[in-house]
Image (tube, grey):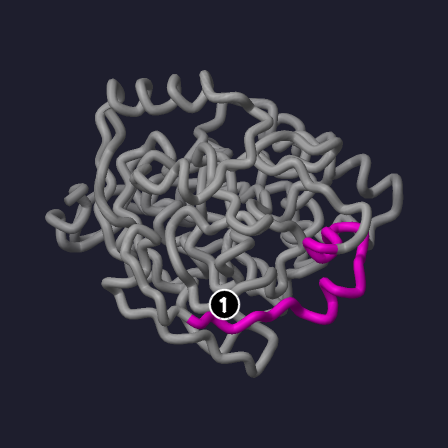
Amino acid sequence: MPLLAGALPRVVVVLSFSVLLRARGAAQRRPAHSNLSASCWSRLHSANMFNSYNVKFHHRKALTSPYPGSHIERSQVPEDKVGWLTEWEDYNPVEYTAKSVLARPNWADPQINDEGFSPKFNERDGEVERKSLNGLYVVENGRPRNPVGRTGLTGRGLLGRWGPNHAADPVVTRWKRDGSGNKVAHPVSGKNILQFVAIKRRDCGEWAIPGGMVDPGEKITATLKREFEEEALNSLQKSPEEKAKLEKQLQKLFSQEHFVVYRGYVDDPRNTDNAWMETEAVNYHDETGETMDNLPLEAGDDAGVVKWVDISEKLELYASHSYFIKLVTEKQGAHWSEDPGSECHK
């Protein structure tokens, strides 16, 4: 029996594993090649399109104006009209796709009506992955529809792909230690303090997890390692010999047991009604600190600054990155908040 309810911008999504498995099984039995129409999926609750984590999900940054890198103002979307199940005949979103995307770089799709462009939504389309990590999404009038709801903007904005745009975010952590090498505990919570490698993005100036887009045909594991090397170690500016040395040192960290923090939709300011960000965030933890101590951080590519940052709830990070970091502290049993009640899932 499908779940029924509207997709609100602030909604707690808590699904039992049995419900998730039934929903996932139903999706897998449906033909992979189908481009779902709005009518045939109108009764599906968007919670079926979220991931298998107990997620307290906020759809806020995808509603902000002006749109990044522009003076474009989104049409205002009231909270009670974000969900597609809420009828809104007067909805009049602004159409916007950045000139950098329309210039057709190799990472961008053509316009939806361009001759010869017939994207295969909800499936792998050649080397381009058009399947969502959240399940099947609706395609309406030839355009994929944001599974979370309205954003006040149609087109692709700064995103290259119609539908899901896949990224990977490596969360590299270590314990904060004193001069004697002992772990440092927070004076209030008593829990050990975790640190992660953070970058300051060149495009918006916000602090973030290093990461970037998955190239066509690229495996997520390769993207995670490549993006960390490029943004946190400046590998693009290294000689072949220096790069080989970096990769050898990183191999130990990236080949060890790791924790998949999150897989799914991201509340990103670049999202539109027809294009949105999805990511796989993975935690690589350097328990002893020995691996990362021998790797000097150096900002590169899209990063303006890179450094180790103490983790706490006071962090203000790009997109949904603060949420990912909180999940890591819970997994590692590390400090997050001075208020113990705030560390519980609500």
Residue at image mark 1: 153
For the point 50% across and 34% down, which residue is it? 284
As drawn, the residue found furthest toward the left would be: 341
User: Which residue ends up furthest to the bottom in the rendered image?
Assistant: 71
**Which percent across, then down, holds residue 170?**
54, 41
How dense is the environment of label 1, judged by Cα within 10 Å: few (below 14), some, or many (20 and up)? many
Location of residue 3 (image quadrant): top left
Q: Give, as a single range, the part of the protein colored magenta.
A: 92-113
Q: Secondary structure at mark 1?
A: strand
Q: Position of residue 243 (x, y in %)?
A: 80, 41
Assign the magenta stretch its main secondary structure: loop
Specify whether residue 107 is painted magenta.
yes
Q: Amino acid at mark 1?
A: Leu
Left or right side of 340 for 93: right
Q: Nearer the viewer, residue 107 or 35?
A: 35
Let me know if residue 162 appears in the view.
yes
Q: Residue at x 25, y 18 (%)?
A: 18
Which quadrant: the C terminus?
Answer: top left
Residue at 59%, 43% in the rendered image: 166
**Vertical placement of residue 291 versus 149, above or below:** above
**Residue 328's quadrant in the figure?**
top left
Q: Quadrant of residue 29?
A: top left
